[in-house]
Structures are given as C-alpha cells and as structure tokens.
Amino acid sequence: MKINPDAIDNKDKIIVTGFHGIGTTGYWAIKYLIEKLNAKRIAIIDSEQLAPVSICRSGKLLTPCEIYEANNIIFLRAESFPQNINELSFFRELAEWITTSGFKELIMIGGLDSTLKTDDTTFRLVTTSKFEAKGVLNDAIKLEDDRLIVGPVALLLNYSEVVDFQASAILSYAATGRLDPRGAANALNVLSKILDLTIDVEPLVKEAELLELEVAGTKSEIERSINDNIYT
C-alpha cells in the first residue's frame, strides 16, 4: 500500500473513516461530510489489492480509496475496497499506517442492526483500551456484551488495540438490506459534537423519510396483493 503523495501532515490529527456495511452508514456519512465541509483531496491510496474500478462524480475522477482534509481533520473515503483474502492484508497495512504515521486518534462510523435497538438512543460506542471518552461520549452506552463486529471496522479496532492506539467506533442503528440515511444522520450528529463541527443533516433526514415512506408503501402494496389473492 502506498500513499501518494506520502508527505501528509498527520501530526496529532484525528482521522475519520467509515465503510459500506449495515445501512451503508459509514460510507454515506463520510461521503456527506467530505461534500458538506468542502474537504480537499490531499492524497490517494494505491495498492495492487484494490479493485480496478473508478467513478466519475461532479466531473472528477474518484479512485477506490482517497484521503481528504478539512478543519484540520483527515477523512478517509473508501469508495470500494478489497474482498476476501486481500481485505485482511490491505486493512492491516492501512491500520499500520494510521497508527504509526502521527495521528493521535482514529474515529470510525458504522451501522448497527436496528432490530437490536432496545431504547431511544441512536448509537452504541466501541473503543480500544487506550481511548479516553470526553464530551458527548462520556455518557455514551457501550455496545452490549457478545455483539459481533465484522469487517474493516473490526480489523482496525483489533489492530489499534494490539498496538495500544486510541480508536473508537460510533455504531449507529440502521436498517439492514437498504441504504439508511437516518443512520448516517444520527452518527453525524454525534460526530459533529465530538469534533466541534457544524453539519446540516436535514437533507439526510428528508431523504430517510422519503425512503421510509417508499418502503412502507411497498409493504402495503405487497400485503394488499396477498389479501386480494386469498379466497375463503
């Protein structure tokens, strides 16, 4: 894995990232942050393990993994990433770079199955032993015992724990099986307080409401179709 250019000023900065997963929460939150904060791309991650894909957005070419900066905060956007055996190797290299290149803290955003929700809170917190809670996270509820974390978030947390690095994951409740902008909005509400950012999440909330109405309408149509075909 190579960072191009590699002369990034990471000294004592926080790096924030998220990945595709439940509700696409982490990826969507990072994408939204970069757009709303008008973050500047400062580097591209290159690796033979990354998928040979690229995306055009707003007239610009986006590569699979890129690094942005805004408000003296570093953001890692993962448009796509390796699968299967390459995933482990790639994210171990990424974890090593994050924990040895001068960053003081890693914050991740992820999704948590909303069917596990038992109260009116919007997220659960997972941290490494080195992590020191402050501000809004002082009273945050930790993820319940024996809940399984999988994928890049788990790997980065595990590596950070091994090397005694300060890392945390904000796991926002989200719908499984579909994009859930509300999950991203709830995570960003927490993150904005941690990092003292002003982030308007109203567009995400409105998009979530439209999706929820669409899902409810589809469910209603299915139920009506079933009822119409039942003869007694």
Image: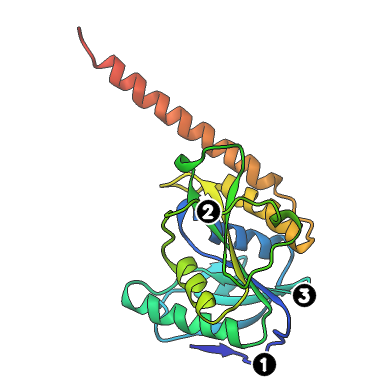
Front of the two marks 3 and 2: 2
Residue under label 1: 7
Q: Residues within 10 Å of mark 1 (few under 14, many from 20)?
A: few
Among the two numbered marks 1 and 3 on one chain, the one whose residue lies closer to the N terminus: 1
> Where residue 1 sits in the image (x, y, percent)?
48, 88
Q: Is residue 27 above or below residue 227?
A: below
98 relative to 211, above or below: below
Q: Mark 1–mark 3 contact, CB under 8 Å?
A: no
Spatial separation of the CA atoms under disc 3 and disc 2:
29 Å
Q: Is residue 154 left or right of residue 76?
A: left
Q: Which residue is mark 2?
A: 143
- Frontmost of labels 2 and 1 is 2
- The residue under label 2 is which amino acid type? Leu
Give the SS element for disc 1: loop
Say which residue appears at 64% left-offset and 40% top-offset.
206
The x, y position of residue 42, in whole percent, is 67, 81
Instruction: Give the residue type that dot 1 points to.
Output: Ala
Residue closest to the eye, 215 or 188:
188
Q: Residue at x 52, y 80 (%)?
A: 95
Q: Amino acid at mark 3?
A: Asn
Residue corresponding to mark 3:
72
SS at mark 2 in the image:
loop
